[in-house]
Amino acid sequence: MNRKLLILALFLFAISGLMLHYRIHPFFVTSKINPAEKVFSLTYFWASLLPLIDTVLVTLLFMSRKTAVYAYLLNGLIVIYGTVLMSHFSINYFMVAKIPPSEWILKSTLPDIGIAFGDFFVGKVIYDSYMEIA
């Protein structure tokens, strides 16, 4: 098993999730006062913080056997929080926008949740690869 390729796959899942998230919640938004100006949105920044932590910190922590357990734990927590938050906001959006149930799956955050779980499962394989050596 090539751990470096798995860490690369983990990073690609995380950076892809971050880019998708930033496309939906850009934290530099058009100013309401001056439409020609971009301003920093703290609310959208907080929304992008978990994918950013996943991309940078989890990837770095998985590079060492000593810190792999923390990476695995943090990765799992991010997936749990991400799943709950994305599901909540999807369901809330469906209720407010009155989206018919027949369109819920395609207009939901289910593909984003799938990316998060793919990231988690790659992290599990990396963690298991470190534990085989012990």
Image: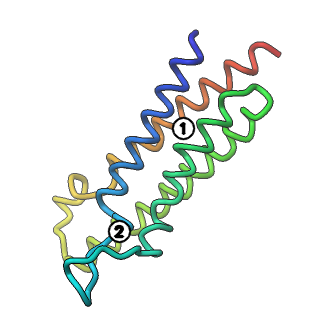
Residue at the image position 23 percent from the left and 86 percent from the top: 34
- Locate the C terminus and report the quarter of the image it occupies: top right
Whether residue 97 sits left or right of residue 11 in the image: it is: left
Residue 51 sits above or below residue 134 on the image: below
Residue at the image position 26 percent from the left and 90 percent from the top: 33
Q: CA distance from mark 1 to mark 2?
A: 29 Å
Three-letter code for the amino acid on which mark 2 is drawn: Phe
Which labelled disc corresponds to residue 16? Answer: none
Depth check, front residue: 108 or 12: 12
- Locate the N terminus and report the quarter of the image it occupies: top right
Label 1: which secondary element: helix
x%, y% of residue 98? Answer: 19, 76
Residue at the image position 80 percent from the left and 30 percent from the top: 66
Depth check, front residue: 63 or 69: 63
Residue at the image position 45 percent from the left and 35 percent from the top: 118
Query: Quadrant of the rendered structure where residue 92 is?
Result: bottom left
Depth check, front residue: 60 or 113: 60
Tell how many labels: 2
The numbered mark, 1 or 2, whose residue comes first in the sequence reads: 2
x%, y% of residue 55? Answer: 52, 43
Label 2: which secondary element: strand
Q: Which residue is mark 1?
A: 120
10 Å neighbourhood of mark 1: few (<14), some, or many (≥20)?
Answer: many
x%, y% of residue 25? Answer: 35, 64
Residue 52 sits above or below residue 5 on the image: below
Q: Residue furthest right?
A: 134
Which labelled disc corresponds to residue 28? Answer: 2
Three-letter code for the amino acid on which mark 1 is drawn: Phe
Q: Residue furthest top?
A: 1
Depth check, front residue: 73 or 36: 36
Whether residue 131 sits left or right of residue 49 in the image: it is: right
